[in-house]
Amino acid sequence: MNRADGLLEYMNFWGKSRFKVAKNFLSGMLKQTSKSRIAIVVYDESPTLLFGFCNGITSKERNLLRDCALAPKEAATHTYDAYEWCVKFLKTTAKGATVARINVLTDGGDKKSLAQNIQKYQALNLKHALSLQIHTTYFHLSDSNDGSRELCDGLNWEYHRLREDNIDEKINGALQRRSADIQLLEANKHKTIEQQLNNAPSVPSDIPLGFTPPPSVDQRKKVLEAA
């Protein structure tokens, strides 16, 4: 896992064809990110961890996804409850990650996606985003108007429709967003290093005999980059 990379996948969808679309998407993600730390959570009314973060994706994780028994249930989809659970999971198990990306796959809305409730979840989502750089993308496996887009607009989640004919496109987009997260983190890290060096005291010109001078700017920069 790149220390800047934490990826959590949610799944919830109704109907065998949607199961297939979602599994194909996730299988493609696992294949393209075999060296990353990924956890997959399935949910309907409550979340269940399919597998947690591991040091690279192996046949074990791919088989768990392949054999995952998903079935339609006549129950509400509790997307935000699952999101809350996964944020807590990230904070306790992905402590090395400074940027995390949550991808939500669902064909259902959310019991809390009513307009009058979204405002209070906006505040919670902002708090999460500030405490651990969490970026959320919502993949909707339905053409129905179930409040999903309104939920995403209110929570500042990126919204996409996922279909059988655009799986590869959406996988590539997800990988590009993750790469952009890492590049931004590295750029900010180097900016911080430069600021620290610029604010560091300069070495005096009249160094007394026997005095060991502090490391040069280049030496300090190497130490900071290695930290």
Image (tube, grey):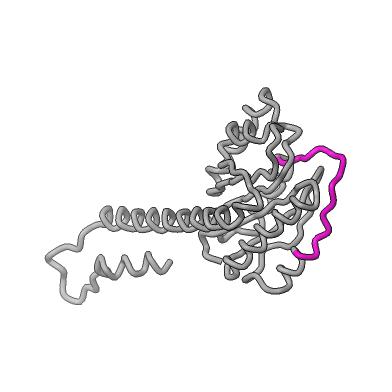
Quadrant of the rendered structure where residue 64 is? bottom right
Residue at the far bottom in the pictured view: 210
Query: In the image, is residue 192 above or below residue 120?
Result: below
Q: What stretch is highlighted in magenta?
A: 66-79
Q: Where is residue 225 in the image (x, y as percent from the top left)?
A: 38, 66
Q: Is residue 63 left or right of residue 30?
A: right
Quadrant placement of the C terminus? bottom left
Residue depicted at 60% across the width and 69% down the height: 34
Residue depicted at 20% across the width and 63% down the height: 203
Residue 87 in view, yes or no: no
Q: Position of residue 9 (x, y in %)?
A: 66, 54
- Identify which residue, 83 or 13, lies in the foreground: 13
Query: In the image, is residue 90 above or below residue 113?
Result: below
Residue depicted at 62% across the width and 34% down the height: 149
Residue at the far top in the pictured view: 116
Q: Is residue 136 a member of the stretch shown in magenta?
A: no
Q: In this view, does 48 lie to the left or right of 193?
A: right
Query: In the image, is residue 194 above or below residue 81?
Result: below
- The dominant secondary structure in magenta is loop
- Identify which residue, 126 or 103, lies in the foreground: 103
Q: Where is residue 147 in the image (x, y as percent from the top left)?
A: 68, 31
Quadrant of the rendered structure where residue 74 is? top right
Query: In the image, is residue 59 above or below residue 87?
Result: below
Q: Where is residue 182 in the image (x, y as percent from the top left)?
A: 46, 58
Residue 137 in view, yes or no: yes
Q: In this view, does 208 lie to the left or right of 150?
A: left
